[in-house]
């Protein structure tokens, strides 16, 4: 798999998971925390994709 595609997938999945975290404590999908945690999840997804690409690629 292309490493760029792996980065996009990691950021997309991480951002999606991060944006749904505020729902666990009763928040909204469009709240400020959802937007912030979406960015945090995207960065975490990029980190995981980087580790996968450079350790197993």
Image (tube, rainbow, N blue to C red):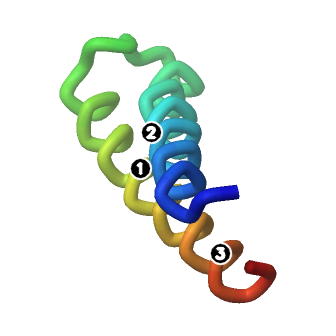
**Image quarter in which the C terminus is found:** bottom right
**Which residue lies under the disc numbered 1?**
42
Q: Mark 1 or mark 2: which comes first in sequence? A: 2
Q: Position of residue 42 (x, y in %)?
A: 41, 49
Task: Describe the element under mark 2 as helix, strand or loop.
Answer: helix
Task: Give the label, 3 or 1, closer to the camera.
Answer: 3
| Residue 31 falls in image quadrant | top left
**Which residue lies under the disc numbered 3?**
53
**Which residue lies under the disc numbered 2?**
15
Q: Mark 2 or mark 3: which comes first in sequence? A: 2
Q: Position of residue 32 (x, y in %)?
A: 19, 28
| Mark 3 and mark 1: Cα distance apart in space | 16 Å
| Mark 1 and mark 2: Cα distance apart in space | 4 Å
Residue at x 49%, y 15% (from the top left corner):
26
Residue at x 33%, y 29% (from the top left corner):
34
Callouts 3 and 1 close, C-beta under 8 Å:
no
Q: Position of residue 52 (x, y in %)?
A: 70, 73
| Mark 2 and mark 3: Cα distance apart in space | 19 Å
Farthest residue in the left direction? 32
Along the viewing direction, whichever of 32 and 40 lies nearer the viewer? 40
Callouts 1 and 2 close, C-beta under 8 Å:
yes
Task: Describe the element under mark 1 as helix, strand or loop.
Answer: helix
Along the viewing direction, whichever of 4 and 34 lies nearer the viewer? 4
Task: Describe the element under mark 3 as helix, strand or loop.
Answer: helix
Residue at x 50%, y 30% (from the top left corner):
16
Along the viewing direction, whichever of 57 and 50 lies nearer the viewer? 57
Residue at x 56%, y 64% (from the top left corner):
3
Q: Is residue 14 above or below residue 17?
A: below
**Image quarter in which the N terminus is found:** bottom right
Farthest residue in the front direction? 2
Q: Is residue 57 above or below residue 15?
A: below
Q: Is residue 57 left or right of residue 46?
A: right
């Amino acid at each position: 798999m292309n490493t760029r595609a792996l980065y996009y997938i990691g950021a997309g999945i991480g951002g999606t998971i991060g944006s749904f975290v505020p729902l666990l404590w009763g928040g909204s999908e469009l709240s400020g925390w959802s937007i912030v945690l979406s960015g945090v999840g995207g960065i975490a997804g990029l980190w995981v994709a980087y580790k996968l690409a450079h350790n197993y690629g």
